[in-house]
């Protein structure tokens, strides 16, 4: 296959200049062939090589605090959807959030991820105050994943010190987007991603593999669209049916296809941070670890308080471990090391900007 003969180009590294890989310009046809498994051995070995060259075998660890499972949206794939009356809702106080963040900092991690449903009870000023307080107390990078917010709110949070923002599309196919996310606005969300970049956020988005109604053709275009946005963080994980959603009876996605997507994204976006999502292990144990050998370079252990963590049930099987955070982090580090990789507690900033002026 033609895609298998596109070389990875690597500059000779020096002690002062990080290694740079040339992004692969895979065509739609090449992406589609790779998604369909026409050369997994080539794809996964190249993705592994690209990841190791770019990140020197480091896996960045981020501590995530899921501080609210209230959500105003009715996304048909998500267990937190507004019409699910069976989920036990919670909101963490500022003190509980700051306590969880303290645990993250005390264990030496360099990034905290603050995540919630689209819960507007956490207003602009409250979130800004939390960001400021965290920055005053700890030397941490702050990633926000708070859903659709007004441009002014995003500006306020950037000014308060937030470093990154994740806003997933789930798909770039308009018809499928409308079917899966009936209360969301496609064009507004795309515009918000552009605005986040303009504010200087390290910006991320992502897709769900095998959403009900998704074809390989749609997924191939999704990969192209995600790459064209030139983002710092790229998320991809398999669809998992949740019993209390409109997609309850739909078949689960494929962990193998999710690995193919992360590998393709790595080749096309060598400097981006790509997490190995917990949804992989929820689908099939061990597949999150395997993703670290197939293009992923980030793992985000949850530091959500154990008394509520299981209620952040965006899909079945999430946050099921009830061990203390330090013990869970130790287990993750051991898993990473078992694959010959190095757990990194650094900030782990995106390297995408290294490619902007060159390519």
Image: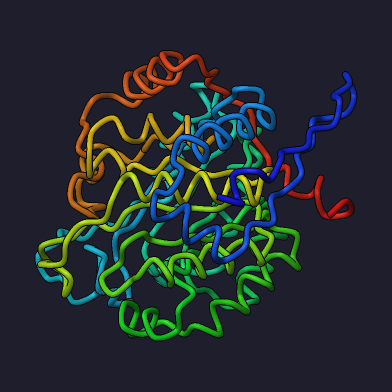
Q: In this view, does 107 lie above or below 296?
A: above
Give percent across and percent down for residue 119. Answer: 38, 69
Q: In this view, does 113 lie to the left or right of 241?
A: right
Q: In this view, does 37 lie to the left or right of 89?
A: right
The colouring scheme, among rainbow, by chain, secondary structure or one colour, is rainbow
Give percent across and percent down for residue 252. Answer: 20, 57
Q: Is residue 295 left or right of residue 358?
A: left
Image quadrant where residue 68 sits: bottom left
Q: Residue at x 16, y 61 (%)?
A: 251
Q: In this view, does 192 lie above or below 275?
A: below
> How many marks do you count on the picture?
0
Image quadrant where residue 306 sits: top left
Give percent across and percent down for residue 133. Answer: 59, 45
Q: Is residue 250 above or below residue 271?
A: below
Give percent across and percent down for residue 270. Answer: 67, 43
Q: Residue at x 31, y 45 (%)?
A: 255
In the image shown, does 320 or 24 lie closer to the viewer? 24
Q: Which residue is drawn at 28% across and 77% down?
A: 74
Q: Residue at x 66, y 66 (%)?
A: 229
In the image shown, does 269 or 308 lie closer to the viewer? 269
Q: In this view, does 256 lie to the left or right of 163?
A: left
Which quadrant is the C terminus positioned in?
A: bottom right
């Amino acid at each position: 296959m033609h895609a298998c003969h596109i070389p990875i180009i690597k500059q000779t590294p020096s002690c002062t200049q990080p290694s740079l890989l040339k992004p692969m310009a895979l065509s739609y046809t090449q992406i589609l062939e790779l998604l369909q498994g026409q050369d997994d051995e080539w794809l996964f070995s190249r993705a592994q090589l690209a990841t190791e060259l770019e990140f020197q075998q480091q896996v960045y660890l981020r501590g995530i605090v899921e501080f609210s499972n209230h959500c105003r949206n009715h996304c048909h794939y998500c267990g937190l959807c507004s019409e699910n009356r069976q989920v036990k809702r919670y909101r963490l106080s500022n003190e509980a959030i700051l306590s969880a963040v303290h645990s993250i900092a005390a264990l030496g991690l360099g990034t905290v991820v603050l995540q919630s449903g689209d819960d507007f009870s956490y207003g602009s000023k409250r979130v800004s105050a939390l960001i400021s307080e965290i920055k005053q107390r700890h030397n941490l990078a702050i990633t926000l994943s708070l859903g659709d917010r007004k441009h002014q709110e995003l500006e306020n949070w950037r000014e308060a010190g937030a470093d990154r923002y994740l806003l997933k599309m789930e798909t770039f196919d308009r018809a499928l987007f409308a079917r899966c996310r009936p209360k969301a606005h496609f064009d507004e969300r795309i515009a918000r991603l552009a605005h986040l970049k303009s504010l200087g956020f390290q910006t991320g988005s992502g897709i769900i593999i095998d959403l009900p109604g998704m074809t390989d053709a749609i997924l191939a275009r999704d990969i192209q669209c995600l790459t064209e946005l030139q983002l710092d963080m790229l998320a991809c994980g398999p669809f998992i049916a949740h019993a209390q959603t409109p997609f309850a009876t739909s078949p689960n996605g494929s962990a193998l296809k999710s690995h193919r997507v992360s590998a393709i994204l790595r080749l096309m976006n060598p400097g981006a941070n790509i997490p190995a999502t917990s949804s992989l292990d929820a689908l099939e144990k061990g597949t999150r670890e395997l993703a670290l050998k197939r293009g992923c370079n980030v793992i985000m252990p949850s530091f959500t308080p154990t008394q509520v963590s299981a209620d952040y049930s965006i899909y079945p099987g999430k946050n099921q471990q009830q061990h203390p955070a330090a013990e869970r982090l130790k287990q993750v580090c051991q898993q990473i090391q078992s694959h010959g990789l190095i757990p990194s507690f650094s900030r782990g900033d995106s390297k995408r900007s290294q490619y902007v002026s060159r390519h």
